[in-house]
Image (spheres, grey):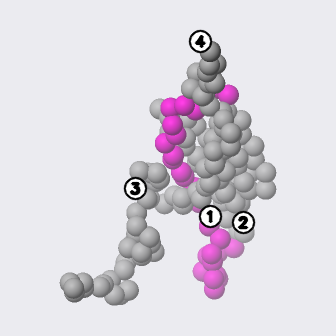
Amino acid sequence: MAIQKRQSFGSVRNFDDLFSRFLGSSAGAVSNSEPEAWSIPLDVVQDGDNLVVTASVPGTSKDDIDVSVDDNVLTIKAETGDSSSKETDGYLLRERLTGSYYRALRLPETVDFENAESQFKNGVLTIKLPKLESKKARKLEISAV
């Protein structure tokens, strides 16, 4: 039996370090290029011949969100301002996020970006990406001889 040295919580510098130690890193799926940006939580579901991406962007409006696709990478950016004009010195507790949101997700080459549909309702962005017709599974007819 090998003895393993454990690091104490005192050596954890921030929450990202804490999560990476206990949950592992999410390498490859998420890319935050802006150090001040908050990562957008999302769900990706295969629904028949469609890929459905649902992203939570609270505190934003439709005009605050920018969605783009470049080289099979879906990028979602959003900006939210402070809901109050008060000085930050008076806060006793501040947990609601303000600022920039950013998320990039590599999608399969089978996705038809030209026919994608998006909808925004109550702080939730839903993007429906159909599969390319040429990439859909086809049923082959069996002939009897």
114 versus 5 height, above or below: above
Q: Callout 2 environment at 10 Å: few (<14), some (14 to 19), or many (20+)? A: few
Q: Is residue 31 left or right of residue 43?
A: left
Identify residue for label 4.
145
- Residue mark closest to the camera, 4 vs 2: 4
Task: Find the magenta span and give its range.
Answer: 86-115
CA gap between label 1 and label 3 equals 25 Å
Residue occupied by mark 3 = 27
Q: Secondary structure at mark 3?
A: loop
Q: Is residue 124 left or right of residue 109?
A: right
Q: Are marks 1 and 4 in contact (CB under 8 Å)?
A: no
Distance Cα–Cα, label 4 vs label 2: 73 Å
Q: Earlier in the sequence, mark 1 or mark 4?
A: 1
Q: Amino acid at mark 2?
A: Ser
* Quarter the N terminus occupies: bottom left
Indicate which disc, 3 or 2, sits on the residue closer to the N terminus. 3
Distance from Cα at disc 2 to Cα at disc 1 = 8 Å
Q: Mark 4 or 2 closer to N-term?
A: 2
Name the residue at 60% across, 80% down.
Answer: 89
Q: Position of residue 108 (x, y in %)?
A: 51, 37
In the picture of the structure, the residue carrying the numbered disc 2 is 83
Q: Quadrant of the C terminus?
A: top right
Q: Amino acid at mark 3?
A: Ala
Q: Element at badge 1?
A: loop
The residue to which callout 1 is attached is: 98
- Residue displayed at 58% across by 32% down: 111
Q: Which mark is in front, 3 or 4?
A: 4
Within-10-Å neighbours for mark 4: few <14, some 14–19, many 20+: few
Q: CA distance from mark 1 to mark 4?
A: 69 Å
